[in-house]
Amino acid sequence: MKTLMKSVVGVLASYAVAVGMAGAQVFPSRTVELMVAFPPGGSTDVGARIVAAIAEKHLGQPMIVVNKGGAGGQVGWTDLARRKPDGYFIGYLNLPATNTVILDPERKAIFDADAFVPIINQVLDPGVVWVRADSPYKSLKDLVDAARKAPNTIRTATTGILSDDHLAILMLEEAAPGAVFRIVHLDGNATQVKEIMGGNIDVAFDNVGGIAPRVRSGEVRALVVLDTERSKFMPAVPTSKELGHPTVISNSTRGIAGPKGMPAPVVAKLADVLKKAMEDPDHIAKLEASGLGVKIMVGAEYERYYRETHEKAKKYVEWAKTRPQR
Amino acid sequence: MNSQPASHRLVESVVLACLCAVFAAATWIANGYALKDALGPGPGFFPFWLGLIGAVLSLVLLAQSWRGSAIGKVVEGLWPDRAGALRAAALLGGLALFALLLEPAGFRLTALVVTAALLVALGVRRPVAIAAFALVSSFGLFHVFYHWLKVPLPVGPFGL
Amino acid sequence: MDSVTHLLSGFAAALSPAYLAYAFAGCVFGTLIGVLPGLGPSAGTAILIPLTFKLDPTGAIIMLAAIYYGAMYGGTITSVLINVPGEAASVITCLDGHQMAKQGRGGTALGIAAIGSFIGGLVASIALALIAAPLARLALKFGPPEFFALMLLGLCLVSGLAGRSLAAALLMTVLGLLISMIGIDPVRGAPRFAFGIADLYDGLGIVPVVMGLFGIAEILITAEQPVREIIRARLSNLLPSRDEWRRSWGAIWRGTGIGFGLGLIPGIGAIVPTFMAYILEKRLSKTPERFGQGAIEGVAAPETANNAYANAAMVPFLTLGIPSSPTIAVLMGAFIVNGLTPGPFLFQERPDLVWTVIASFFVGNVILLVLNLPLVGLWAKILHVPFRYLAVGVLVFCVLGAYSLQQSAFDVWVMIGFGVIGYGFRKLDLPLAPLVLGLILGPALERSLRTSLEMSAGEYSIFFTRPLCLGLLIASAAVLVVAALKLAPKQLRQA
């Protein structure tokens, strides 16, 4: 009887040790899910699938893309904020969209700026202002002068309420006092193209990636890139800094983050794996073919960028909520 | 006139009354959102009026029902017999169980248990058929969707 | 004439063994994806994008396009056989298609759907090849105010879906419109009716809702009834009778017209042409009471319209680079990742590629017909599976389908909830189609109204100063007046 008891205890003890050791297994020991807060096929999604396919090899475990679209990304980010911070579920943040969701009180976001741990940034897509090729506005100056002469008549499209385009319009109005644009919120880049081509909209604020091919082919004219340096996808277009509006800097970034509380070694491992994937020439080539510039920011650099974007967005969100035609 | 038995009228009345309540609640909630905006109808405008119209329509239909004329054709046997009701309830229960256990227990385990249970509840008595069907519906489908189509499905404890 | 030369060389390329194989594979994948409820062409296409990295651009695009219209037919199969619409566009097919299946004529329904789809798709492809560019530019005139007016017209046509009681149809429409307002509103960008539940912020997904209202409700209703004889369809029953042919013929051509016309306008959504084609057939029919009970025109019209729409939607995409729907947006993503930008300049720079793709649409339509028509008998056999196994199998598929949309158990609950609601409504003979119509049109109406007002800075005159918009508004008013006149004596008689 005693020996039986001893062996039972022995078996139980070694089982406990085994389970305990299993718990302390090396990360990752199973599939990692990479969430995109938009429906499949969009540019964030395509970029995610490209990077996941390469990162898998460095990770040693499968990495699958999970789409959780809806409410301009809010559904997906809400889910991300609630997940276990064990590194098996990470997702894309689209700044400043994520920031504006947090900052707009009416959106009632359940997460705040501290809810995420930024891991690594993939893409930085600068803002651009464009018109139809036969438009009377040949330069940014033409546009601003016209907006001053006839305030609130130029129909200006964004890709969504409180998108980076929306904030960019407000930034321009701030930098060029007297200029007032009639803001029309469309849903996405394709709708902007359709309405501009159809003559229903006069000028669109968007990002380089969405419109670079058409600028290249001459179908549309880009007036200005809202960045400090020229875009390699449209090198002939001047920047807002060159044109005398150095404060009008706007862009949209896509980076990967996890829920807060992720252990530092897990974050470091993911950052390392993703960085290798993003530096892969195949990855860069595919993204650049889509007009997206890869800008890798890791660790403290990305964290700092995240906070800065949040602060900057705060001012414009408040203004947007009080403006009569938002 | 489209006359109907009392039981049918009761069910109709209950459903219409519920709908009326839902519409009224929607109107009330919509009133809390802005009805007007600088440019036109606000977020509350359409829900407010739709709720109101819906409530009125359901009351109109309710009145029609009380006066004895049913909404649509009166189907023979609105109420199912006991066996039928049990079958439908079993399927519904199985569905609810599936939805409940799907994420905590993982797809394969949940599908296995629920399909087997439902087949038994519906009267299948051949263990081999049940086992085969349940296995294909759980592990089989999982393999197709997860590994071939790369559609993420929940994986529960024990890696199942 | 230049187009014809291009088209011919396009054919030569499209009929090469490799591209033929891609088109075939695409049709097969597409049909399978369409059969799996919930997965839908857009998710399926997105999933297969990485696969296409390994192929050359033309081949990849041929395959993805084939998947796209293959999936449309796959959705028909489940709608007819088990009353589960794979995506919103297949809802109308359920109305008469499934009734036909219950009467043992499921094979005929699938057959006429395949033939109608083929004709619709072929005609649309021909039109695409010949008159694409000028038509596309014309379609651009459709701005937000025109959109609003068109959706309004669609709403006014709901009386065409009413069965016995117009009031009941209106009630269901209003309910659908109201439910569609759950979620972020187009005015402030803030959530409505969400009660703090994050899953509701985007509203209720249309796919889980229709899968519940039609598919789950059907299973529950069938389960209650005592086991009945499955009407065994003999092979000869798979072909439509001469009378049915005659009736479908007109429906097919009218469906083609509606589908093609609406497909040229970006952003309409596949469900609108199917509704309109169905309602038109019902209106023109001398025996409208047959609709909803298994009228073959009720299947021929929407199915043809569906496929004509899908092929026509390629027009704004190829000629102007504007994607009409989420699935085509995915296709566009595939173009872009391969370094190609659809649009007028692609026609000039790479005519070989564009015309090969256009030629492959013809080929794809033929392949679909050849693939599906013989299989119709096989698919129809599914109905012979004993109900006990069929029901459980369908339930698992539906749960899988609903979950796989967004990896969310919430969608499964929505499907179950609407299954119960659909069950209740069907017992009381409250019509479901107007509910779905309201659900689809609600967001489109509100958003286009809002965008129009933003364009005009609040001036309502924008709706009356644009001729196309004004025309559509007058048409809506006319439809309402006619409906009121028709109904007034009937209501008085009922009192």
Image: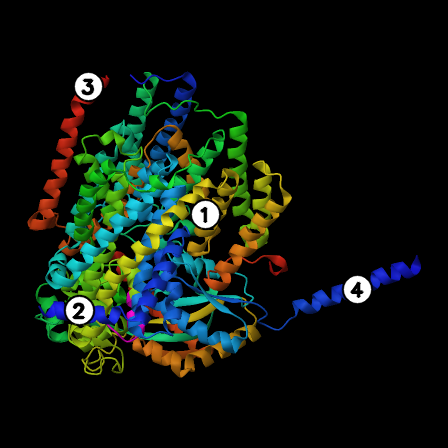
**Where does the magenta region start and end?**
C332-342
- Please identify, in this view, whether the residue under mark 4 or under mark 3 is nearer the observer: 3
Whether tag 3 and tag 2 are in contact, CB under 8 A, the answer is: no
Label 1 vs label 4: CA separation? Answer: 45 Å
Q: How crowded is mark 4: few (under 14 residues within 10 Å), some or many (20 or more)?
A: few
Q: Under tag 4, what secondary structure?
A: helix
Checking the image for residue C8, the label placed there is: 2
Q: Under tag 2, what secondary structure?
A: helix
Q: Which amino acid does label 3 sit on?
A: Leu
Q: Does the magenta stretch include residue C340?
A: yes
Kindly identify which residue carries mark 3: C492
Give coordinates of residue B60: x percent, y percent: 29, 24
In the image, taking residue C30 as reference, residue A205 lies left or right, namely left
Checking the image for residue C398, the label placed there is: 1
Please report whichever mark, 3 or 2, sits nearer to the chain's N-terminal start: 2
Kindly identify which residue carries mark 4: A13
Residue at image x 45%, y 73%? A53
Q: Are marks 4 and 2 on the same chain?
A: no
Q: Which amino acid does label 2 sit on?
A: Leu
Residue at image x 42%, y 67%? A92
- Please identify, in this view, whether the residue under mark 4 or under mark 2 is nearer the observer: 2
Please report whichever mark, 2 or 1, sits nearer to the chain's N-terminal start: 2
| Chain where mark 2 sits | C
Q: Under tag 1, what secondary structure?
A: helix
Q: How crowded is mark 1: few (under 14 residues within 10 Å), some or many (20 or more)?
A: many
- Please identify, in this view, whether the residue under mark 3 or under mark 2 is nearer the observer: 2
Rendered view: B29 above or below A153? above
- Please identify, in this view, whether the residue under mark 3 or under mark 1 is nearer the observer: 1
Whether tag 4 and tag 2 are in contact, CB under 8 A, the answer is: no
Answer yes or no: is residue A166 visible: yes
